[in-house]
Amino acid sequence: MTILSADNLTKSFGATVALHGASMSLEPGEILAVMGPSGSGKSTLLHCLAGIFAPDSGTVTFDARRLDTMSDRERTRLRRTDFGFVFQFGELVPELTAVDNVALPLLLAGMRRGTAYARARSWFPRLELAGLEDRRTGELSGGQAQRVAVGRALVTGPKVLFADEPTGALDSLTGEKVMDLMVDTVRAEGTAVILVTHDARVASHADRQITVRDGQVIASGVQV
Amino acid sequence: MNIPTTLLGLLEPEPSHGYELKRSYDTLFADNGRLLSFGQLYGTLNRLERDGQIQVLGASPGGGPDRKQYMITETGVAQVETWLSEPERPEPMLQATLFVKVVLALLSDRPAARYLDVQRDAHLERMRELTTMRKAGPLSRTMLADYGLFHLEADLRWIDMTAARLDQLRDEISR
Ligand SMILES: Nc1ncnc2c1ncn2[C@@H]1O[C@H](COP(=O)(O)OP(=O)(O)OP(=O)(O)O)[C@@H](O)[C@H]1O
Ligand SMILES: [Mg+2]
């Protein structure tokens, strides 16, 4: 079974070919690590898979729907309901409190304020953030902020979480803790994950890895 | 793993029967290597006794080896002390093997990059196992898993660097 797949994607930025016939697929609930050298096209692949930008050619299919031919409005809606995002720098709103940040996607989706905040608060103990609900996110440590970002990404119950170097700005021990909690939570929720990372330790939390090189996905586990 | 000295170290707090020693060893260190066989256990104990590092206490008459209790001697304690205080040779074991493989592959025009890819996958597979072990705890196993993970990570860095410089290396060694 496949929830998300890419077939023969190409994408160029001016003269730079970022993707050059990339294909992959993801199963529901699967954690897939995307590895590869810097500049190989990992983030570009993630952005195409998430419908953040459209590929020049090739297809992206999510839940039997073609993402690459969808209208911008439809894609934006899908991103809001079915996808969650965590980036290297959490991109939280620093002036808002932690719980405001986590409640935000629910409010944007039109949920009543009381319900949204109750649901947002319920995520704090799970991410070992109890007591930090009302702290402004600008005043959190890097590891705490990334866990808030994980909460914000998962609060809407997405089917796929896109994580691009989620621990890239953290030291090993802090990064490990973020990964442990992220993995425990997505396992409990059944969320599939696209985990882009340079770091083999981070990738070792995944069920499987693929390698991107020169804009293509290298099959893994191929015996010589 | 230095089995004789490890057994000495386990005997240092108090005398113990052979089967108890095996149980302590397996509980504490089997994850780190492999289970101790009885042959290995009693062979090692005999040698330690011969070398005066342990002595046998109150073997009950007519009993098999299992009836014996072993006690560490002063010589044995000194051996434990020496072993613990001496650093280990920082051996780049695996790296040496991988390096030989890469060079041989390049010399014979075989696909060195693909060998490295396969090795990378094997390393990542092992790292996944260790990560699972690490998460299950207890802390002693977590720390052992961490040790393995950091080493494999170092190997992987070397593999990546080497993969990126294969052309250069081929030029250099075929000169
Ligand atoms: N918005 C953009 N405009 C121009 N070029 C881009 C853009 N985004 C990516 N590229 C180029 O496309 C190629 C692939 O970039 P991408 O960000 O996907 O790599 P990556 O594998 O994520 O690298 P890193 O590990 O450094 O994050 C690179 O050569 C990059 O310079
Ligand atoms: Mg990137």
Image (cartoon, rainbow, N blue to C red):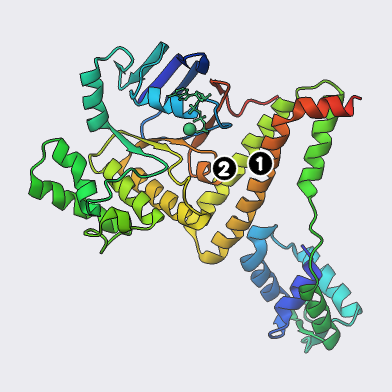
- Depth check: give the residue in front, B17 or B123: B123
- Seen in the picture, residue A196 relative to B89 is either above or below; the reply is above
Label 1 residue SS: helix
Q: Name the image quarter holding the C terminus of chain B.
A: top right
* Residue B85 drawn at (x, y percent): 78, 75
Q: How many marks?
A: 2
Left or right side of B15 for A3: left
Q: Quadrant of residue A64?
A: top left
Residue A142 image offset from top left, x and y in percent = 40, 54
- Specify the amino acid type for callout 2: Ala
Q: Nearer the viewer, residue A62 or A41?
A: A41
Q: Is residue B129 above or below residue B72?
A: above
Write down the residue under mark 2: A200
In the image, A166: left or right of B25? left
Near mark 1 (Cα within 10 A), the count class, few <14, some 14-19 or many ≥20, is many
User: Which amino acid, by three-letter code, is at mark 1?
Assistant: Leu
Residue B41 in view in this figure: yes
Give above or below for A39 relative to B53.
above
Whether disc 1's CB lies below 8 Å from ligand 1 is answered no
Residue ID for mark 1: B156
Disc sitting over residue B135 in the figure? none
Secondary structure found at label 2: helix
Chain to which mark 2 belongs: A
At horizontal 78% and vertical 86% (from top left) the residue drawn is: B59
Residue B54 makes an appearance in the image: no
Is the C-beta separation of discs 2 and 1 under 8 Å?
A: yes
**Does A57 sit left or right of B60 as displayed?**
left
